Amino acid sequence: MTSPVIIAIDGYSSTGKSTFAKAIAKELGYIYIDTGAMYRAVTLFALRNGFVSKNNTIDTEALRKMLFSGEHPVVISFRTTGPDGASETWLNGENVERDIRTIEISRVVSHIAAVPMVREFVDRSLHEIGSGKGVVMDGRDIGTAVFPDAEIKIFMTARPEVRARRRYEEMRSKGQETPYEEVLGNIRERDYIDEHRKTAPLSRAADAELLDNSDMTVEEQIQWFKDLLKRRHLCGF
């Protein structure tokens, strides 16, 4: 690419956005930012501090005081851990990568992400990171709300059953045994919450390229991206 740009990748949960984004970032020499992990980290923080009740009611005032506290700021950062472009999430100096990938976090994260001031906190952090461009970000509203002027926007989707199977296998590989039916139910619930939240609901930007990877390998998705760059007359791989 002739000059650094922002690549915004949005879409439904468990579509493989992070895998796709990391592969692109690695090839382009860009920084990969896992925005979903930021919301998961805030969710973990809220749960640990008792800001979420059993029925997922959130003590927004208490959470606001902590997120925007000048004395004890909540700091979320990423550290690259390997040659494949993978990164791990750190919360206030603690590696929480494994903690934020549990089904407990998955049940609550969409509720946390729907809180306007949480999105304000995350968006502010993302703007600081992306100000120099040369970044690949994946999430739910990167191309519509966070960086509407991103040079390249991609919206990813896949059938719910396919996404649930991917999530199920990922959790099993990490030693987390959760019934497939429960994972599928969580996927559908998250889709509904993401699509219907009042603040920045999940939607495809008008100028975003659609990538349905239900029946695609990672290699085929990368080839799709190469073809996209060619169509846009951009240098890349």
Image: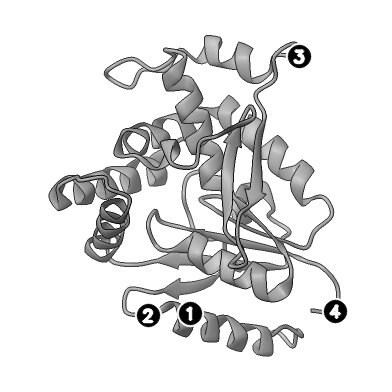
Label 3–label 2 contact, CB within 8 A? no
Query: In the rendered structure, which disc, 4 or 1, sits on the residue that comes first in sequence?
Result: 4
Q: Quarter-wise, where is residue 56 in the image?
A: top left
Q: Secondary structure at mark 2?
A: loop
Residue 74's quadrant in the figure? top right
| Residue type at the position of mark 2 | Met
* Callout 1: SS: helix
Q: Which residue is mark 1?
A: 221
Q: Are marks 1 and 3 in contact (CB under 8 Å)?
A: no
Q: How many numbered discs?
A: 4
- Judge left or right: residue 63 versus residue 197: right
Classed neighbour count for the residue bearing mark 2: other residues with Cα under 10 Å, few (<14), some (14–19), many (≥20) = few
Residue topped by disc 2: 216
Q: CA distance from mark 4 to mark 1?
A: 22 Å
Q: Where's residue 194, x and y in %? A: 40, 44
Q: Are marks 4 and 1 in contact (CB under 8 Å)?
A: no
The amino acid marked with disc number 3 is Gly
Identify the residue under disc 3: 70
- CA–CA distance between discs 1 and 2? 6 Å
Q: Earlier in the sequence, mark 1 or mark 3?
A: 3
The crowd level at tag 4 (other Cα within 10 Å; few <14, some 14-19, many 20+) is: few
Tell me residue 124's x, y (percent).
Answer: 71, 36
According to the picture, the residue beneath numbered tag 4 turns out to be 2
User: Marks 1/3: CA distance?
Assistant: 43 Å
The amino acid pointed to by label 4 is Thr
